[in-house]
Image: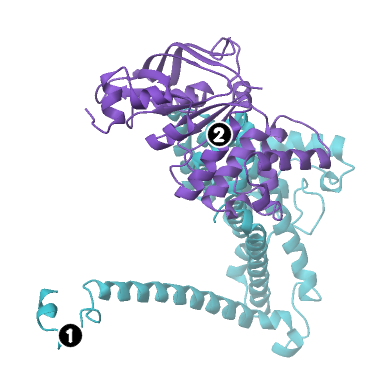
Amino acid sequence: MSKRIEAIDLNVYYGNFLAVEGVNINIEPRSVTAFIGPSGCGKTTFLRTINRMHEVLPGARAEGRLLLDGEDVYATGVDPVTVRTQVGMVFQRPNPFPTMSIRDNILAGHKLNGARMSRSEADGIVEKSLRGANLWNEVKDRLDKPGSGLSGGQQQRLCIARSIAVEPDVILMDEPCSALDPISTLAIEDLINELKNEFTVVIVTHNMQQAARVADKTAFFNIAGTGKPGKLIEYDETSVIFNNPANKQTEDYVSGRFG
Amino acid sequence: MTETATEPAKRSSLTASRGGAAGDKVFSGLALAAGVIILMVLAFVAIFLVVESLPALWPEVFSDEESIESADTFWQYVWPLMAGTLIASIIAILLATPVAVGIALYISHYAPKSVATPVGYVIDLLAAIPSVVFGAWGMTTLAGGVVPLYKWLHEYLGWIPLFGGDAGNTGRALLTSAIVLAVMILPIITSLCREIFIQTPKLHEEAALALGATRWEMIRMTVFPFARAGIISSIMLGLGRALGETMAVTLVLSPGIFSWSIITSGRNATIPSEIALNFPEAFGMRQSELIAAGLMLFIITLVVNMIARWIVNRHKEFSGAN
């Protein structure tokens, strides 16, 4: 399954502070979309509104509409918990559950959903998810060891495996490679290319080469100054954003001239 | 530094000590001294207890008398006291732990800040109340208040040995002491648990939430496993205080011989209150008996702490410390 994401006039607030203003975007299913922009421009904030994770912070809220295949995530009666089972998330730093084995990390989402499964079904899910995250061969002999014993890159792939195990429609990635070395980064980027066959992938990145390598479309966010809200400046095919952007701000940013 | 560079023949820049190295030595000396002092104090206490208890432990060898005063053998004398102490403390822990963990969770993860801070202060204030005040409250207010409850327990649950005895009219029974102890150790467990719950990495909490966990599921997946060792330690600290608590129990409990019934007045006693009640008038063999009872309490506490360590270490690999 894979769903289309549409934001319509979406504003995000922290208390009274308007953090992101007026986002309109239409993200195709089975594609990789990268969000780029300077720090504090609201790309992570907007990403976290897609699975309502920003609500974890007290006082954070969103106004406007955010549709997953036409269904409003912010409609009354929608439980954020349900949204998050359909929209998986991978974080900036790898965060496998340290008290769980590799196997239990993968099955954590299923256990939450209250699924009762046989040993062989569970084994199947573990293997499929780990293969999907290109991690199976490295960990198949130590599934009962804690996930925190893996290297950083392996831990991040374990987190990706954990989120794809519950077969979400969308996978959000918040700078997934920023804590990783170049080789682990490459492994994750290869994985992202494979993930788009099944999922809608949205990735926030500070690394413009990474956006150019993995994304079909790229969205550029910018901020007018401190205390001003972040805005979506331009959203287009990745090649257009990097080679022939329509907006002057985008051109300055991707060519390394800030201002 | 420039001086050493201009006169290379005299001093190597590598062997020259940097300013501040002396402070490092002083500090490591202080830390070592502190560690040694703790061990020495502990050793002296243990030696004192053992030496002073010997006449009661082996009267034939270490005293002029044939046996101890209060009973035929020391074990006959001490086991009811040990049982009373353990029963009261364990009931106190059973009563206090769920409440304490609940309050700590409420403060750390549920309450808005405007509520959590004052509640936290009230809990800390509870820890500052002297135990004699708790004892007086238990004796005057609580003991009278629990009588109807004890009567009810005896009538409907009397088939359980714990509620088998007659409830009486004063309520000054072991269960009342245990309730007072529970109130006393509640703030210790609560504030320690809260400290640890707050330290749960945000990253792990968000990992659980992003998988679609409700808040309670998030707490079970991340907060409890993370805080496990800390919860056990806080319970053990509370247990240590309950085991050694003297004044509150002495005031509340009207002591007597051992009985399984914890709702009957004039039954059971604990080691600390036994010592407190009798020590001022004791001499000779009686004094040795009491000190030997203290030694038993010392050993119980030691064993409790060792069990706690063992539990904490058993799951080290999965503790999240790596």
Q: Residue flagged by tag 1: what amino acid is it?
A: Arg
Q: Chain of mark 1?
A: B
Name the residue carrying label 1: B11
Q: Residue at x 60, y 32 (%)?
A: A195
Identify the chain of the residue marked 2, using the numbered disc in the image.
A
Q: Quadrant of residue A59?
A: top left
Figure chain in purple: A
Point out the image quarter for the C terminus of chain B.
bottom right
Chain shaded cyan: B
Q: Residue B99: give x, y in percent of width and height.
A: 62, 39
Q: Residue at x 45, y 26 (%)?
A: A58
- Please state the horizontal and vertical placement of residue A170, each as a whole percent of the image: 58, 25
Residue appearing at x 67%, y 35% in the figure: A165
Q: How is the image coloured?
A: by chain
Q: Which residue carries the number 2 mark?
A: A193
As measured in the structure, the alpha-carbon distance from the residue carrying label 2 to the one carrying label 1 is 61 Å
Asked whether B283 or A3 is in front, the reply is A3
Question: How many numbered marks are there?
Answer: 2
> Is A156 located above or below residue B84 in the figure?
above
Confirm whether residue B143 shows in the render.
no
Occupied quadrant, residue B217:
top right
Image quadrant for the N terminus of chain B?
bottom left
Which SS class for mark 1?
loop
Element at badge 2?
helix
Residue B18 visible (yes or no):
yes
In the image, taking residue B173 as reference, residue B291 lies left or right, namely left
Q: Nearer the viewer, residue A91 or B99?
A: A91
Query: In screen coordinates, is B200 left or right of B9?
Result: right
